[in-house]
Image: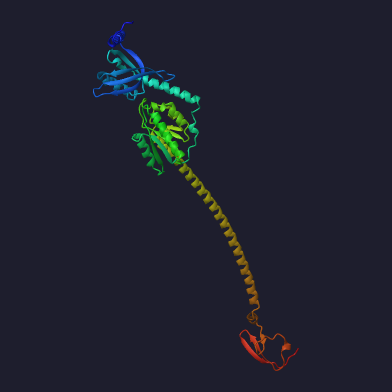
Amino acid sequence: MEEKISLYELQEKVKRAVDHLSQGSVWVTAEISEIKGNASGHWYLELADYNEKERVLAAKARAMIWSRSAAMLIPFFESTAGAPLSAGMHVLLKVQVQYSVIYGLSLNVLDIDPSYTVGELEMNRQRVIRQLQQEGMFGLNSSVEMPLLPKRIAVISSETAAGYRDFRKHLQKNEYGFGFEAELFSAPMQGVDAPAGIIAALDNVMEKLSCGEHYDAVVLIRGGGGALELACFDDYELALNIAQFPLPVLTGIGHDHDFHVADMVAYAYFKTPTAVAGYLIDLHLQQAERIESLYRRASAALMHCINNNLNALQRCFDRLENSVRRVIYDEYNRLKMIEYKVQAHDPMQILNKGFAIVVDGGGNRISSASAMASGDVVKLLMKDGEVELSVLKVKK
């Protein structure tokens, strides 16, 4: 029968086997699966290592950062990496191995290299970019047609984010008075839960679209942050959903230097949420200016047409006036001729020339001697009076 030993004796053998590791330190790479601090200032971590291809857990261990070390390491990491130490991060830790016969193996964290975490994120970002390029995702969302006047906007952001408030203020209080409707679809905008939360918000937009709601575009905004806080926007699944979304997706994550994968696959990206609002306002302004230009051109064309017609009417009026003048002049001359003729046949004209007119007792003009007989009484009309005569004899 094999020799039997107690659990304590077994643990002591293991402890003696690893004691030489506790005399020094070693740099270890791992993923933080859980992290929490307590009131005394100590931090406790659960570290894990995974098979890269199948994402299968390969190893795990407990680690702690004692309060004296944590007071320096935690702020240093956050200020350098731009984000607090949190679950899901890949880290490079300088550790001292400790083994207790009661608590087992644990790691005492002596130092943290923030540059490794940032560098690991960049490597992951490049892998995501290459995969999306191979799948033809770049340029897919930018080929979706943007409405000329996007009015109803689905906004994906955190309700308490300053960037969201800036976006709404800039959009709703634009100086031109353009009207917009912005509906918020709340989602976490940092950390390991952010990609899934944003994808869920996109799904909510799709569900409303399928129920008859209308949106012209989707806006994904955040108010800036450090490299690690914004790493969620390099997530493959999130980028895939943005690229394949049926509406234009505009990103305004709030970073001045970094260019995230979500920006690359979106319809358009902007540095800040207010810049996204400015873009939407500019689209309306462009159409307003176009309408104003068309109005000016139409007004100019109408005035040109009116002026041409007025000129034509003036020419017609001038021709009509000239024609009427000629008709009046001709008629005036004709009347003058008639007047001359009438005047020429006026008996007074004959009398004024020294002639006399013979009339009978009834005042009828006698123009022939055969119309008179002896004894008739006739009147002789002269220019200065009349003479009554008695016919003595008619000689034919």
- Compare residues 384 and 23 and report the one nearer the observer: 23
> Looking at the picture, how far across and down is residue 321, in whole percent?
58, 62
Residue with the most extreme right position: 396
Up/down of 282 relative to 342, above or below = above
The answer to whether 351 appears left or right of 143 in the picture is right
Q: Nearer the viewer, residue 319 or 279?
A: 279
369 lies left or right of 181: right
Q: Closest to the observer: 290 or 156?
A: 156
Residue visible at 47% across and 30% down in the picture: 243
Left or right of 62? Residue 131 is right
Quadrant (top left/top right/bottom left/bottom right) for the N terminus = top left
Residue 202 against residue 80 in the figure, above or below: below
- Which residue sits at x=41%, y=22%? 122
Give coordinates of residue 8: x percent, y percent.
Answer: 27, 11
Quarter where residue 67 is shown: top left
Outermost residue toward the front in this view: 1
Q: Position of residue 393 (x, y in %)?
A: 72, 92
Q: Is residue 196 visible?
A: yes
For the C terminus, the quadrant is bottom right
